[in-house]
Image (tube, coloured by chain):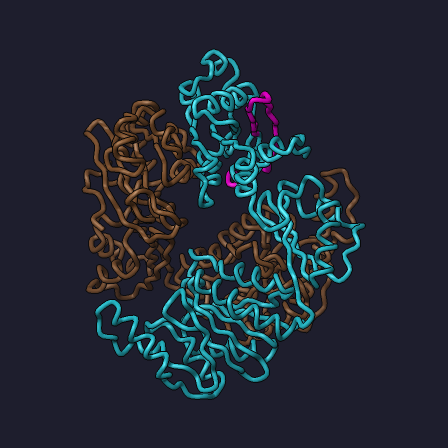
Chain colours: A cyan, B brown
Amino acid sequence: MPRVELIAVGDELLSGLVLNSNVARVADAIGGIGLELAVVVDVRDEVSEIVAALTAACGRAEVVLSSGGLGPTSDDLTRDALAAAAGVELRRDPALAQVVASRYAEWNVAVPEAALCQADVPVGAVPIPNPRGSVPGLRMRVGDAVVYAMPGVPAELSGMLADHVVPELAATFAAGGVAGRTIRVALAGESVIAAALAGVELDGVRVAYLATPGDVSVRLAGTPTAVVTALARVRAALGERAYSDDGRPLAVVVADLLRDRGGTVAVAESVTGGMLAAAFTDPAGASATFRGGVVVYATEAKAELGVDPALLARRGPVDAEVTLALAERVRERFAATHGLATTGVAGPDPVGDYQPGAVYVAIASAAGSEVVRRTLPPRRDLVRALTVVHAMDLLRRQLLGLRPYQG
Amino acid sequence: MPRVELIAVGDELLSGLVLNSNVARVADAIGGIGLELAVVVDVRDEVSEIVAALTAACGRAEVVLSSGGLGPTSDDLTRDALAAAAGVELRRDPALAQVVASRYAEWNVAVPEAALCQADVPVGAVPIPNPRGSVPGLRMRVGDAVVYAMPGVPAELSGMLADHVVPELAATFAAGGVAGRTIRVALAGESVIAAALAGVELDGVRVAYLATPGDVSVRLAGTPTAVVTALARVRAALGERAYSDDGRPLAVVVADLLRDRGGTVAVAESVTGGMLAAAFTDPAGASATFRGGVVVYATEAKAELGVDPALLARRGPVDAEVTLALAERVRERFAATHGLATTGVAGPDPVGDYQPGAVYVAIASAAGSEVVRRTLPPRRDLVRALTVVHAMDLLRRQLLGLRPYQG
């Protein structure tokens, strides 16, 4: 397998508030053909920095990918750096200049001279089409490495990876054909999953774990035959913990299950404060199965939804019965087939006898109601994020006739 | 100013799903004393990769920071790499071994031999205390550079930066004392802000822009006197667009304004689907000012909140009057002083005559009601994220007696 490195160009990556999410896009795209990133370097918009990073990477790696720095403004310097690293000149490509000029003509604007730099190409480089944006990518050799320079705009980067870069890399480095599949698991940690897969025969397949709070992706890459065999074995070993074997996120899996059954969901949220509804409405098309929700943050808001004020006064806002009542009332109010509710303590302060991390998640449906209690790591952002996963997975399991997640 | 680089160690950073959020923590911490990251390198958990990255960075930079790879397991290799890069041995520090052993004694467990590697220190390195975790950091010279090796766990990293690394760097490189202040601006883009600051005299102060959708931080760093002068000038130039001059995020600023006035807020969300409530409940202590919310995703849900079904039938779910009614009804339902509502089209498909990106945001209070229409970039995630900022800023402006944001 070739060594692959990524150089991400842009002051904003080093200044603090912008995370380099293109790492994930690139890793995901090349992971599908069994390739991995060996190193990622974030560099500023300065020619000397980009040249130094390119020269070092091309001395180590067979494939060097870059993102960013291809636009028309004065701080877009990847073209200049590529030419300098390869020791060649930039030449204006008349066909590309035509494309740039015609785009401005569409806007009834004369093309500014500065914008034509987007048509400059290092001698020996091949432009890569970019129908999603105005700036082409570039492929060229620098030393013994092949460099693919791509735009930093996420949609353009992803499109260029899918349409050009990954197919070319697959053709060059994966002659036998490489397939990839991603199995996703809710709530079980990496170590639990690794233990479950310990005895599983996975010859000829690369396995990579990718974890976010409450969610682990198990990525398999290898020849198509090996991946099909491995997929069946991994699914069998993980059982009901695996919610997806095609990379679909949990919100989409649950929405698909609901749609297949003519079901709908409504949510009553305390501890998750709107995040559960936001997760359900994140995928396009959510309105087919998500009815609505209530964020019952203040205790009186819980009573307003129809929870017995005497019960609230007796038990407090974090309570199994209160959570059950919330799930039942919200199901009624939105005329949904399923109601979900969350209560708990995100912290940092305790609520009554409950410490941060104590949460209840309840589900109500025609089949009856059920509530589970969980003790989560007492960090505010984790409590909120993990409770969302617990609630979604509880609904998934009920739709599939499974018991709630057992710790 | 010294050149500062960061080496982030960990397979998970290169595998795709985990973003390197420690870049933001480090940039933010050193930004406070006027330092910037020149390069960030993400490397795998392999000694040869870490040594190569350390050697290259120490050849270029005066200060090299690292995160990760200091734990007790076999894939924690930063200690070994540091020793190799400096050409020295690892020696067990008896005092540190005592600290590690006593921690296991607290758990009534004999200390495993493998865990004692956390007490190994490259000859010439100085341990940095880490009261938030079990593994100390390390400070040592490699060539002409000083290396600070820190844990990758975010809370431990941030604590070590604040308690040790930043004060040491300030003492070494900023003899006159360096102060930092962050002014935050909602909804105006970087170019608008740069234009507003074009004529402003900012001698002796470094200015950095950090942008996320709908939010720009303008960070000023320099001597305390210069920063105070610059802060006043920047505030005057940005006027009401600046919502914070101490780095507080918009949700906290709005909550503080509400609290000062004895106010509360409730939200009715369609296009933002729970994200506005989630943003209000993100900071600890949100329950003092956030009453609750309704996610009125389905059209019938809007009627259920008390919006006239005839109006809904006549105008459809995306409409100025419908949005006003939602803000008014949710204010009543939760007995809040202020009601906010969002409707619109996140996409990808249009709704009636409305294209993706068309949104309404309404506010209701004792002073009356108001609705604004905005046309946002037609990308689902951006529409949702920017509408949250528009709604929060609308409330901020009303609390301050300002007109809504004027595009």
Question: What's the residue at 42%, 33% (across, down)?
Answer: B285
Q: Quadrant of residue A399?
A: top right
Describe residue A316's horizontal placement relative to residue A175 as left or right.
left
Give the residues in magenta.
A359-381
Q: Position of residue A291 (x, y in %)?
A: 44, 32
Relative vertical location of residue A363 with respect to residue B183 in this rendering, above or below? above
Between B107 and B183, the residue placed more toward the observer is: B183
Q: Of residues A155 and B354, which is closer to you in this image?
A: B354
Out of A257 and A71, give the one closest to the viewer.
A257
Image point (21%, 26%), residue name: B366
**Chief SS of the magenta region:** strand
Q: Is residue A150 above or below residue A48?
A: above
In this view, the residue farthest toward the bottom is A88
Q: Percent position (x, y) of residue A120?
A: 38, 81
**Is A372 on the left-hand or right-hand side of A123?**
right
Coordinates of residue A236 in the picture (x, y in percent): 74, 45
Write the residue at 41% across / 37% down. B274
Determine if the magenta segment contains residue B295. no
Where is residue B317, by image quadrant?
top left
Q: Quadrant of the C terminus of chain A?
A: top right
In the image as oriented, which residue stretches furthest toward the top?
A310
Q: Please identify the quarter of the rendering in which residue B392 is found.
A: top left
Residue B167 seen by the camera: no
**Place of residue B45 in the rendered image (x, y in percent of width and height, measured from the top left):** 66, 62
Q: Is residue A371 magenta?
A: yes
Q: How many numbered marks have been drawn onto this rendered protein structure?
A: 0
Q: Quadrant of the N terminus of chain A?
A: bottom right
Viewer can see residue A144:
yes
Q: Identify the residue at horizontal 59%, vertical 72% (top origin).
A: A169
